[in-house]
């Protein structure tokens, strides 16, 4: 993490031959930023004298700059970078004859420098916008979005628990039609928070496995969880024998809720989670293999997209700063997916059967979904998260 | 344009040509021709050096990775250039939302293919990003004889991009023949890319490179890999490849290095009733033809030979001594030497009036997995080129309809496409002429 402030997107060409760099890409993607060359800015030396700063006017490029402040005045001084009245960076108590360094990450704009005595004229620091990538967000910048994301996840898991209870109660009461009705509304909450839910490998296995994961497929006794209930409800059309599976699923949901409550969410799981959700869509939801018995795939398609979009929305202030075009592309492509999905919304807020999805729309999904997958794969790099 | 640029940096520049050709073991006559080309002759493509490059390269101990086919030129490589051992054909739906998106796609294809066919250092990003190159060929991408040939299907000329009026006159969508069992997921496409190189890995590297850069505008529709025996390829011209039925296939194929012949039979004619932009292009037929090899292997040799019309071992037409003997059908009107229903006789009856229905074949074998019945899913990835679809493939196939071989083969996929003219310079891009004609 320590490096995330300083490392910037760079294009490393093995031999440095410029002609081999990326062409402008069709989808945009991370390659589009390849012109952001590395810079290793030399330190700017500012000498404080009794009369003020020397030089009194300094221009630097946006991003990280190291200032070497030498105090050649007769008294201990503090040196500050001011944006209007706000202190952006400072070094206090630099003794006469000593020097200190200060590394500041500055956005483009006009700043002032304090130069020893308050009566001394302030120096002028001009930070020019550059074509270089702006400085990486600091770990602190991610704290807010990560905390908000955890609130979102907790909210989702709370609803998941409530909806799962409706589902499992209906199953245990033998109310087939009711259980069928609440299956998709419950499962979607799991799909929205999949990047976090998947961190608990055991629960993910017992809650969200598909029959493909087992040697004996649907007949395998280890096949339990949402999709096992789905198979019983929609293929066998019976709740017979599902009670132990319902009980286990309910217990798992409560366990998941508890574990998420105590979880410290890592930035990489959130930033990378958006990409994981879209990969899930690209490789599974488009094919209709997720909810093969109930054909409620479009609920989960939307849930994965919503989960990814939530992450992007929370991170967007940081993404915009790094790469406004990336932010715009993400926005556009989410919108395109939502527009196609909206065609299949039913009046009660649900979705049509996957079988209603036209070949044309299945193909049309591929463009924005694949573009999202490419763009989101660059998100960790864009935000400097390892 | 200098000759070096014409060839996309391939090692055929006038200064280094002699060394290169010595290395490649080219014969003096070929060398003269090549030097002539390097000196600025235009419009020839590199068909004239067909079948010389890979053999020479490999004989001299070269591993072939630096084999290189020209990218820039009036015509694309991958039609009359020598066939390397590995092929991959990928067909796509174009998802571009408008004409500008379509142009972006063709410009991207141009840039990537120019790079991939020439090779160079694989670019990389900060390690927190996914690497933009798959790394399949290592940090230094080598050309490996790669050609990526870009063609367009009839569906690209629907109402999406307003290209209707610029459609190649003879371009139609593939229709079902009596023996076909076309599977929708293996047919047609807006754009088809034919990758050919020395190895499957090089083709896959190129495909993945292009996919990474076209996520919002290209969606894979179908894909199939093909292969030819590398040892036979080294001796092409002297030896003919066998297909998966065990028969030599391609004995009577056209000589791709015969420029005049190619201009007549293969390349779209600027004098015909075609849009001007099509000059330098050609019609491509792709057919995925499954062979029922288990059944075939359980068929008596005499019957196999009667069905094909050739000796299985030597490849000679039945009752003839040598593979390349030309059967005299006029003297055999009742099919006593070669049955009237034999594949080779139907395909090429050698009668007046059928000369124009010749095609340049450039097929590959394929092998995929098993069928639902547990039988081998393999066969012929048939590819051919012609200036006129109706007079070329369609005429040949209509003669073959009902042939005895049909009991053992089943075309299941493919399509008809138009190979775009070549990219002539760094300012040009694929389909520029088409887009301008439709503007």
Image (cartoon, grey):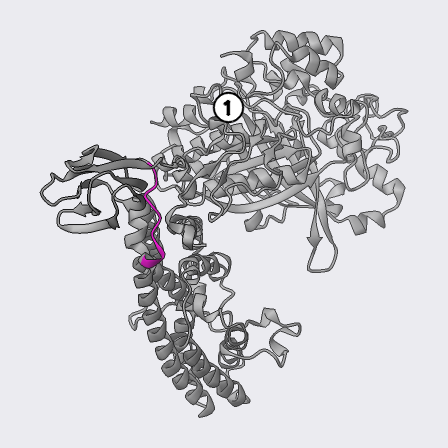
Tell me where residue A142 appears, x and y as whole percent: 34, 59
**Residue at image x 46%, y 27%?**
A18
Image quarter of residue B3: top right
Asked if residue B188 lies left or right of residue B242, the reply is left
**Residue at image x 80%, y 51%?**
B295
Judge whether B246 appears above or below A292 on screen: above
Towards the viewer: B352 or A359: A359
Q: Which residue is most to the left?
A: A119
Towards the viewer: B136 or B219: B136
Identify residue for label 1.
B421
**Residue at image x 35%, y 69%?**
A150
Q: Secondary structure at mark 1?
A: loop
Tell me where residue B127 appears, x and y as whole percent: 49, 46
Please say whether residue A137 is one of the residues in the magenta stretch. Answer: yes
Residues in magenta?
A: A132-140
Main SS class of the magenta portion in the image: loop
Q: Chain of mark 1?
A: B
Please say whether residue B48 is one of the residues in the magenta stretch. Answer: no
Circle 1 Cα neighbour tier, 10 Å, few/some/many (<14 / 14–19 / ≥20): many
Tell me where residue A227 appears, x and y as whole percent: 51, 75
**Residue at image x 84%, y 48%?**
B297
Judge whether B51 appears above or below B88 on screen: above
Whether residue B173 is visible: no
Whether residue B221 is visible: yes
In the rendered image, the quadrant that contains the C terminus of chain B is top left
């Amino acid at each position: 993490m320590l490096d995330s402030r300083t490392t910037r997107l760079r294009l490393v060409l093995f031999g440095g031959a410029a002609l081999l760099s990326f062409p402008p890409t069709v989808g945009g993607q991370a390659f589009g930023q390849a012109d952001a060359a590395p810079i290793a800015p030399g330190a700017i030396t500012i000498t404080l004298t009794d009369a003020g700063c020397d030089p009194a006017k300094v221009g630097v490029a946006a991003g990280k700059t190291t200032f070497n402040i030498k105090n050649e005045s007769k008294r201990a001084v503090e040196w500050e970078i001011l944006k209007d009245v706000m202190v952006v960076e400072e070094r206090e108590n630099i003794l006469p004859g000593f020097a200190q360094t200060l590394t500041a990450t500055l956005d483009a704009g006009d700043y002032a420098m304090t130069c020893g005595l308050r009566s001394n004229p302030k120096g002028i620091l001009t930070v020019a916008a550059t074509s270089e990538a702006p400085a990486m967000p600091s770990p602190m910048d991610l704290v807010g979005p990560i905390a908000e994301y955890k609130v979102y996840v907790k909210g989702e898991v709370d609803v998941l628990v409530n909806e799962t209870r409706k589902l499992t109660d209906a199953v245990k009461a033998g109310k087939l039609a009711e259980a069928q009705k609440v299956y998709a509304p419950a499962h979607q909450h799991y799909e929205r928070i999949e990047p976090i839910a998947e961190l608990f490998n055991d629960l993910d296995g017992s809650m969200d496995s598909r029959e493909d994961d087992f040697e004996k497929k649907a007949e395998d006794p280890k096949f339990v969880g949402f999709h096992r209930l789905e198979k019983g409800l929609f293929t066998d059309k019976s709740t017979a024998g599902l009670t132990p599976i319902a009980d286990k699923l309910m217990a798992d949901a409560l366990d998941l809720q508890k574990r998420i409550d105590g979880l410290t969410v890592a930035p990489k799981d959130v930033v990378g989670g958006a990409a994981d959700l879209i990969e899930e869509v690209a490789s599974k939801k488009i094919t209709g293999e997720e909810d093969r018995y109930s054909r409620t795939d479009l609920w989960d398609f939307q849930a994965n997209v919503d989960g990814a979009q939530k992450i992007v929305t929370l991170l967007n202030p940081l993404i915009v700063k790094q790469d406004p075009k990336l932010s715009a592309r993400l926005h556009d492509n989410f919108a395109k997916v939502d527009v196609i999905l909206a065609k299949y919304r039913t009046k009660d807020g649900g979705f049509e059967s996957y079988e209603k999805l036209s070949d044309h729309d299945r193909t049309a999904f591929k463009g924005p979904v694949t573009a999202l997958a490419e763009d989101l794969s660059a998100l960790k790099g864009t935000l400097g998260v390892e | 344009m200098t000759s070096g640029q014409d060839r996309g940096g391939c090692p055929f520049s006038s200064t280094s040509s002699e060394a290169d050709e010595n290395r490649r073991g080219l014969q003096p006559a070929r060398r003269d021709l090549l030097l002539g080309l390097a000196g600025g002759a235009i419009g020839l493509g590199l068909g004239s050096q067909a079948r010389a490059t890979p053999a020479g390269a490999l004989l001299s101990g070269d591993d072939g990775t630096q084999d290189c086919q020209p990218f820039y030129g009036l015509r694309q490589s991958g039609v009359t250039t020598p066939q390397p051992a590995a092929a991959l054909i990928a067909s796509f739906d174009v998802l571009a939302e408008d004409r500008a998106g379509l142009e972006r796609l063709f410009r991207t294809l141009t840039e990537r293919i120019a790079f991939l066919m020439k090779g160079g250092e694989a670019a990389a990003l900060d390690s927190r990003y996914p690497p933009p190159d798959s790394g399949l060929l290592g940090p230094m991408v080598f050309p490996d004889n790669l050609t990526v040939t870009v063609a367009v299907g009839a569906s690209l000329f629907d109402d999406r991009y307003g290209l209707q009026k610029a459609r190649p006159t003879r371009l139609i969508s593939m229709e079902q023949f009596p023996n076909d069992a076309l599977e929708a997921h293996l047919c047609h496409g807006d754009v088809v890319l034919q990758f050919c190189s020395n190895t499957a890995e090089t083709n896959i590297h190129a495909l993945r490179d292009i996919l990474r850069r076209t996520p919002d505008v290209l969606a894979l529709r179908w894909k199939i890999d093909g292969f030819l025996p590398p040892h036979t390829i080294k001796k092409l011209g002297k030896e003919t490849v066998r297909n998966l039925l065990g028969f030599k296939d391609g004995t009577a194929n056209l000589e791709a290095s015969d420029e005049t012949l190619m201009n007549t039979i293969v390349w779209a004619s600027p004098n015909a009733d075609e849009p001007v932009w099509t000059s330098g292009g050609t019609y491509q037929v792709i057919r995925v033809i499954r062979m029922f090899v288990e059944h075939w292997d359980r068929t008596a040799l005499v019957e196999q030979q009667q069905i094909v019309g050739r000796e299985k071992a030597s490849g000679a037409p039945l009752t003839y001594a040598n593979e390349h003997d030309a059967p005299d059908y006029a003297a055999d009107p009742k099919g006593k030497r070669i049955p009237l229903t034999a594949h080779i006789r139907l395909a090429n009856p050698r009668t007046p009036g059928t000369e124009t229905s010749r095609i340049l074949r450039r097929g590959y074998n394929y092998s995929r997995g098993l069928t639902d019945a547990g039988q081998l899913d393999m066969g012929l990835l048939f590819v051919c080129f012609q200036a006129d679809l109706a007079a070329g493939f369609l005429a040949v196939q209509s003669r073959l309809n009902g042939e005895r071989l049909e009991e053992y083969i089943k075309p299941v996929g493919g399509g008809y496409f138009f190979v775009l003219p070549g990219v002539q310079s760094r300012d040009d891009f694929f389909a520029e002429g088409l887009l301008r004609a439709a503007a």
